[in-house]
Every structure is written in structure tokens, then in C-alpha cells.
Image: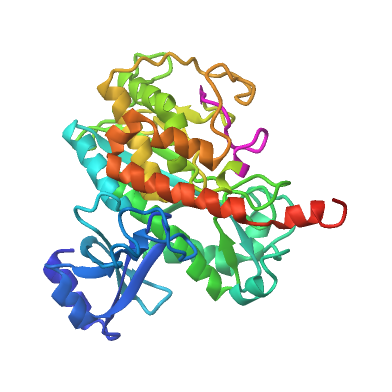
Amino acid sequence: MTKQEIIKKLKAYPGKKVKVAISDIDGILRGKVINVDKFLSLLDGGFGFCDVVFGWDCADVCYDNSKFTGWHTGYPDALAQIDLNTFREVPWDNNIPFFLGDFEGLEICPRQLLKKINKKSLDMGFSPMFAQEYEWFNFAETSENLHDTNFNNPKPLTKGMFGYSILRSSQNKEYFNDLFDLCGKFKIPIEGIHTETGPGVYEVAILYTDILESADRSLLFKTAAKEIGHKHGVIPTFMAKISPELPGCSGHLHQSLWNKSKSKNLFYDAKDKNNMSETMKHYLAGILELLPDILPFFAPTINSYKRLVEGMWAPTTVTWGIDNRTTTIRCLPGSEKATRMELRVVGSDVNPYLAMSASLAAGLYGIEKKLKLKIKPTVGNGYEDKSNGVLPTNLWEATQNMKNSKIVNKIFGKEFIQHFSATREWEWRQHQIAVTDWEKKRYFEVI
């Protein structure tokens, strides 16, 4: 739609209001509802949005280690810009018009970071095509009850371990069908959705597209699932690990590079024994080389690292393989259209703008440096192949790798890495001072 067509549609909307939102550093939507006339007056000049959205954590507790904003700056407004290309109508909320925005020129804005890296890719002659998959648990709960019970023993939507179950999806068909249908109407086209192994677990594959639109879809899907779930008495969670006995929840990233016109997949080479082009091999080598230093982009929370354990369908080693689900990168060399790679280290708790930025930037680094793919493909159990190293095992270790990497600071910008590292160090500190249920059960009586 053109700008004038959008304006005409907004003026005709009977509700006379518009919903706008931006992503904070954790990938949480922060937004507001604006009168339509006020919104129209903002289209060209933008609008003020309190920069505290980059100065507090997921629980709205203000960082004490942020140079960007804080009590020392007075938490002023930053200038947010509306992206008209993100126009949607929310089908489960009276079709209220919806737009995403970001902060042009602000180095620490996740969507701006992705735009910058995407531009570099386009300038190099590559069109990055991405798609994200999510796994997540669903509970037959209300927000009020979860808080009243301190999030203990929530009731799963279904019982038992039943992946790819037609029975389980039909037993909750109203919620299941609404997810598929309403997301489609919300411009989040779903390629497929099914139950996954675990009580009340679903997996969704969002249809692939260019990287910025893919990240928008991925970000919006989490909120969509939560809002649609609320209609059906369901609370979804995108925590990476909900139970030590059950597999964690992934956010796998499928990706490939195409030419500028998107007519040719540059990862495909029919002459190679695995149909993998030199471009794909360089890209793969870049991710593998930088992986230990960019892990917080893919595993950003304390909980993320409880997913990355052996034998639980999440990788722990610096490995790749051909259609191997035990390695960090699963290469899928097939037809010219379908050849791609799947980055399996990514959890469902990520900010998709940051995860896609990191993956693309590392891949482009490999292409720029013409890195040789020295790591051989793992055949068999990737957990046992430690020949190229293992991944950091906690957020602190991973953050220190990222913070102190000269290459990472250069690729993403020192200002962004400084801020993102500070937010992850803050997260670690909150974890350190917390007294958990596990500690109480273990030590309360016997120590």
C-alpha cells in the first residue's frame, strides 16, 4: 500500500485509534495506542518515546550500569520513526491499525542494528532470506493465577509427550486454528504448525522472506501467540527451558543468501558434492569462527544456558553437519530453491532482530575474509565432537567473550556491544543475588 492509501484507510477506521510499538533490547514489544489524528501528524517528523525502554530490564527495573540512559540523563524522549511498511490490522482486536517503529540513528536500537547489517549485505550484492521457527510451552492458566501461585506447577495445556500429534492439536483446535488463521491475517504467514515433544508444546515455522520482514514477523508472533492464547485461556511461554526433565524451546534460524533480484540462491552449487557453494562455505566458516563470541545474541538470558545441554536437542559444540540435528549448524543442501542452513543454537527467548543481525554479520565476515571451511562436517553425534571447542556454558562467560572481542566490537559497533554487554552483565547480577526454590529445598532443613 502507498502512504496515501494507508492514510485513507486510517481515516476510515471507525475506532479512531492506532497501535504503535518498538522492540526493546530483550525483544519485548513496548508501545502505546494513539489517536488517529495525532498519529497522522507524526508520520513525517516522528514522535518522542521515552528512552527508558533501553534503560531497564524485562521486569522494568532500571539498569545501574547503562551509560546510554539512566538517572544521570533524566530518561528523556528519543525520536522514534514509524515504518509504514509494517502496517497491519490486528484481527483479534477489532482490526485496530498497527505499526512498528524504531529509533533512526540510535546505535543501540535492535531494529536499527539489523537495518545496518542488512544494508551492508545488500551493498555486497546479497539479499538475505531468513525464516524463524519457535517451540514453546502452552499452559491452561491465567496471568492472575500464575502470579498468585508464584509460577509454581502451572497446568500444561495437554499431558504427556506427543510430538506431531494430530490428536492433541484437534483437542485444542480453537486455539490451534486461531494461531494459524489470525496470524495469517496479521501478515505473519505460517508455513506449518504442529505439537512438539512435551506437555502442551507447539512448534511453528514462519514463512521465509527478506531478513527485516522476517525479524518483524518473528517478533510479532510471540505477542500474537500470547494475545490469541489469552482469548482461549492459554498462557504461552517462550522461555528457553521450563523444566530440567524436558527438552528446551528453540528459535532456529533458517537462512540463505540470494542475488539482488532474489532470482538465484547463492548458497547452491550443483557442481559441489554437497551442492554447497563457496559463498555458503565462507558464510558457514564465519559463523563457526565467531560463534563463541556472539553467543549472547542467540542465548541472551540466564535460562538460555539451561537449554544448551547434551542430549536435549540443543547444541553444545562448535560443529556443523549435513542434515544433522545434533550439531550447532545443520546444513540442508538440496535443490537450488531450498539449499540453506539452520542455526540451531538459537533459543525461543531471543530478540529476533539481534539473533538475525548476529548470524548475518558473522556470515558476511566469513565471506569478506574468504574464510576457509576448515572444520569438517560432523557425522554422527555432535555432542561427542569436541574437536573444535564447546560453547560457553553460562551468560557471564559468553558476555565476557563478546565484550572483549575486537572483531565483534568492530562488526556491531563499540557503542552497541558496550550497551548490550552491560545489560547481560546486569542480568547475571540479578541472578546471583536471587535465592531460588532449588536452594531452599536443598539447604533449608539439612544444612
Query: Which color scheme does this rendered protein use?
Result: rainbow
Pick the front one: 206 or 446: 446
Q: As displayed, is residue 231 above or below residue 429?
A: below
Quadrant (top left/top right/bottom left/bottom right) for the N terminus: bottom left
Question: What residue range appears in magenta?
Answer: 306-321
- Horizontal side, residue 245 vs residue 413: left or right: right
Query: Residue 225: x and y, percent?
Result: 49, 63
Q: Position of residue 76 (x, y in %)?
A: 26, 68
User: Measured along the vertical axis of the image, is residue 117 above or below residue 276?
Assistant: below
Identify which residue is drawn at 52% across, 27% down.
323
Total marks placed: 0
Is residue 350 magenta-colored?
Answer: no
Give me the residue at 63% from left, 65% from top. Answer: 172
- Whether residue 436 is visible to the viewer of this picture, yes or no, is yes
Q: Residue furthest front?
A: 72
User: Where, by quadrant of the figure, is residue 355 drawn?
Assistant: top left
Q: Is residue 69 above or below residue 331?
A: below
Q: Residue shown at 35%/24% (left/top)?
A: 280
Q: Nearer the viewer, residue 417 or 193?
A: 417
Residue in front for this viewpoint, 218 or 179: 218
Residue 428 is situated, as x and y percent measured from the top left of the image, at 53, 48
